[in-house]
Each structure stands twice: as structure tokens, then as C-alpha cells.
Image (cartoon, grey):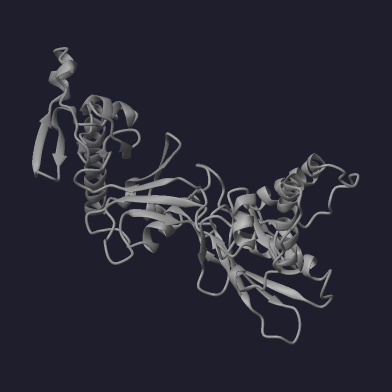
Amino acid sequence: MSYGDRQRPSFSISSPRAPWRRAARPLVVLFTLQLSGIGCAARAPELPAPTKPDDFSPYLTVYEEQLAQQGITLEGAEDYVAGRSASPLPEAADSGDGAVVDAGAPQGQVGEPTYKVIDGVPEYRIGAGDVVRVTSFLGPETPAPLSFRVQSDGTIFVARFNIGAIQAAGSTPSELTRVLTDAFRQYVPNGFVEVRIDEYNAWRATLTGEIVSAVGEGPGSYGLEGRVTASDFIYAHGGPTASADLGDVRVIRGGNELRVDVAAVLSGSEQDPALLSGDIVHVPSIEEGSSRFFIFGEVAQPGVYIYTSGISVLDAIAQAGGYTQTAKRSAVYISRPGTAEVVPVDLDVMLGAGLTAQAPPLVAGDFVVVPYAPDRSQLIRDWVGIFSLILSALTIIELVRRD
């Protein structure tokens, strides 16, 4: 049943004294509103009986403050009592199941957590703008689910039994269930309620880049339904395209950037970060978005490194800990898979002539290869060892022949 379906008592004040009529009318409106199961749940202020029109002001101030906490203005209440509107709530919209909910509410702030851990289990954290469905089991009658949009101040307004405003934001569905059950049991001792989330609007994150587009999927802004990780978010809304670089996914949060290797996450070798409200998850392409380079061969720490604009092949080798003693410095080369280009680099000539400023710059995705070349002293030791084995074998053969 919506507010507009309630039977509203009709009151009029007929007094020859216009000041009294003007002063008392707002209180009559508030009283009528309260009889309809809406509005002020608190007791009236204990003030002296009015002896002049101005004495109504303290009563009116208290009730207006209570209504304001529920998003109701005195003008809206007067329109409702007079039959000019179906609800005293501003900009109301029917949720489709008999409850009237506020049509708009702000989203959560950037960086706010989207879940709470209750008894070791992460649960969705309710916020402003969410729509919660409350099903009341209060007796033999069929339970009637009602939906409430969480207001900007974090409350929902429960008209039944004139319970009034209930703080919902910051709670989980299980916590709000307990609060509402306690409130209803003041009137129905064995009653209980069930709370579910109809719409996840409070916490949102944005997905950009190489994401498969389909109906309801692809790059865009999506609600965060509790604890959602970066990889979950990507695969829940279309998944990566064939050209996505999953090794260099970015989570942008408040001006900071967190890099996530989704392939490593799926293999269990890297943690999958949980998203916060306002996060941007960007999936770059291999051709355009990659910001890595690879270095292999005779360096101290071969592997994958973050590419930065302007980095040279010498910078890359230095990042990898420098070349080893067995590096063939004259035969270093850069391989570019995107263009099939190979750039030779003679470090001996470059370092010997002091031409380090002319070291070739890298581009994102380059492979730097430092080949192996054993040093001369090692070669001499190897050959001496081989000759020793040969001489030993010949000596053994000669001894056997003599016997």
C-alpha cells in the first residue's frame, strides 16, 4: 500500500480569529500526518498551553525538525493532507511493489569500503542510494515486501507502527535485519524481518580499456556488490578482449596507480586487490597500453620490468643488475615483436668510445637479449681439462697394452 492509498482524516479549523487559525493549521496538518502512520514519532515538547498564536511556534519547530530528518517539508505535508499529492516525500517514485521510495540519492565517496567482515565473512555495506527490500513476517497474514531507498543521510523511513527513521547506511543486510526485527518485536513479540538488497547504487567503479562489449557489458560504470576484486570486476562485465594485456592491468585510486598482473592472480602467485568506491580499472591493449619490457640472457636479474618513456637499452641493463662476466657485449640486440625489427647493440664499441648518450631507446614491449660468451680464462681452463683427460686416457691405454 502506498502513502496515497491511506485513509487520511480531514480536519478544518473554523475560528473567527484568523491569527489563531493560521497558527494552528500547521499543527493540525502534522497531527493528521501522524494519524496516517507517517511523520513525527517523538513525543510532543512539554510546553505550556498556548494562550496566543505565537505560542504554537515551539511545537511547530520541533515537529518540523523531525519531519526534515525524514525528508518531509511542511509544505509537502500540507499538500498530502489536503489531497494534492500522493506522498509527503519529495520526488517520490513507486518501486513497483507497493512501496514509495526516494528517487535520488548521492553515491558514496571515493575510497570508501564496499563491505564489512561479519563473523569472518565479507558482507555488503549498505550506503546512500541503495534500495533495500524489507519483508516483514509479523503474523498469519501474507508478508508484504516493501522497498526503501536509503536517503542521503543514511536512513530509511519505516511508517509501520510509526517506527520512523532507521539508520541503514554503514550496516550490512544482516545487521539491519537485527535492528528492524528488534524494532518490530516491540509490537509483535514473535515477528521477524528479512532484508535484501534490490539495487546496488552506493558504491561504483569504472571499467575501461580492452573489455568485450555486449548488452549490459563492456566498458562503463558498475555497482560494487560487496567485496569485488579487480579480476572479478573484469570478468563480471564482459571479460578481456583478445588484444588485452592482462599482465599490466591498472587500478587507479585517488591519483595513485596500482598495477595488477591478472595472469599471476589467476595462477595464485599474486594477490587480487579488492576494489573501493570510485576505483577505475583499466585494461590496456598489448599494442598500445603495454608498459613493460623484457630482458633475458647474461644479466644479473633477467625478467619483466616496467617501461618508462625515454628508457635506453643501457638503462634497461642497469635495471636488471648489469651484465655478467660471461655476457657477449658486442652482440646485444633489441627485438620488437610488433614490427619484427631487430636492433643490434655493440656495448664494447659504445662504452669504449664514450657513446652512451647514443644508446638506442626502448619502446614498450621490447625484448632485450644479452647473449652468452665464456671468457678466455674459462676457455683455457676448459681446454687444459680436456687435454688432461686425453693424456690420462692415453696413459691408461699404454699401461694396459704393456700388460
Choose between 47 and 219: the one closer to the eye. 47
In the depicted structure, whether residue 242 falls above or below residue 161: above
Q: At x 48% / y 56%, what residue is drawn?
A: 224
Tell me where residue 198 appears, x and y as whole percent: 53, 67
Choose between 2 and 362: the one closer to the eye. 2
- In the visual, does 253 lie left or right of 28? left
Q: Residue furthest top?
A: 354
Q: At x 63% / y 56%, what residue is drawn?
A: 78
Choose between 235 and 174: the one closer to the eye. 174
Q: At x 24% / y 29%, what residue is drawn?
A: 309
Q: At x 74% / y 43%, what residue is drawn?
A: 61
In the depicted structure, whether residue 162 falls above or below residue 188: above
Tell me where residue 246 appears, x and y as whole percent: 32, 52
Report the label total: 0
Q: Residue furthest front?
A: 16
- Whether residue 1 is visible to the viewer of this picture, yes or no, is yes
Pick the quarter of the image with the C terminus.
bottom left
